[in-house]
Image (tube, helix red, strand yellow):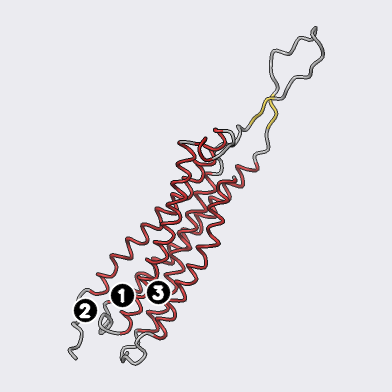
Amino acid sequence: MASLGLLFAGFSIVLPLVLFGLLVVVVVGVSTARNEPDPHNHRLPATYLTAVSFVLVFTALFGLTAAVASVSSLIGEEDSFSVTAEPDFGDDFEPRSETPLTPVDDSDVEDATAGALAGAFVVVVAGGMLWHHRRTLLGLLDAEGFRGGAGARVVHAYLYATQFVAVLVLVGAGAVTLYGLAQVLVPGLLSDGEAQSVREGGARLFLTAGALAGGAGLVAAVHLREHERVDRSAPPPPVV
């Protein structure tokens, strides 16, 4: 599990970025265009919906990563049974024809299953809440005066903040994914340990970091396209 420590240690770096992105969304929602008239009162609901959506997006992403990490932790685990060695009673001793098998503690499998289910539960709950808030936000986009008002500025700030954090996560997780792949392909160049053990650790790292990188890339791509939806049918800016 040592190689996965590199990934989970990176969460301590990613978490401040997520909190920073959330702070950007809230601050922009509260302060953006304070002197800009908001006759339809769209700024406040847009701030709430985008702030909650930001948290839910990355909660679902990290839940997915945790589920994959739990499953991949089983790579390299021993079989569910181990062979017990026969005692040495001298040269005249004849071993039994059947080799006894002793069950091995399967707590690792139970822990991995519990972790995978917990991660999947987080993804389902966060995804369902995100779907609900997204539908509400899309309905708000079609409200009168939204696309040309302060609410649209809040949504754009949310999209940019989400893209910013997702791209940083993608870069970091992508680098770790490549490192895990290198451990699988050329274990001797990266570690002095046993090649099989290094490969197994690299496979765990590749799957877990790859899930995080793929999810972050998807988040960034989806939110990049959402700018067009916000700007659609927006009235032209006033001529000064």
Quadrant position of residue 146: bottom left
Q: Of label 3 and label 1, which has the lower sequence position?
A: 3
Residue at disc 1, secondary structure: helix
Answer yes or no: do the residues labelled 3 and 1 have beta carbons within 8 Å?
Answer: no
Q: Position of residue 2 (x, y in %)?
A: 59, 46
Circles 3 and 2, Cβ within 8 Å, touching? The answer is no
The answer to whether residue 234 is left or right of residue 7 is: left
- In primary-sequence order, the first of circles 1 and 2 is 1
Q: Amino acid at mark 3?
A: Thr
Compute the Cα span from label 1 to label 2.
15 Å
Residue type at the position of mark 1:
Gly
In this rendering, the label closer to the viewer, 3 or 1: 3
Cβ–Cβ under 8 Å for marks 1 and 2: no
**Could you tell me residue 142's position as x and y percent?**
26, 77
Identify the residue at image location x=48%, y=72%. Answer: 20
Q: Secondary structure at mark 3?
A: helix
For disc 1, the marked residue is 139
Q: Which residue is mark 3?
A: 50
Q: Which residue is mark 2?
A: 234
Number of on-image labels:
3
Task: Tell me where residue 48 sits by quadrant.
Answer: bottom left
Circle 2: is it few (<14), some (14-19), or many (20+) Cα within 10 Å?
some
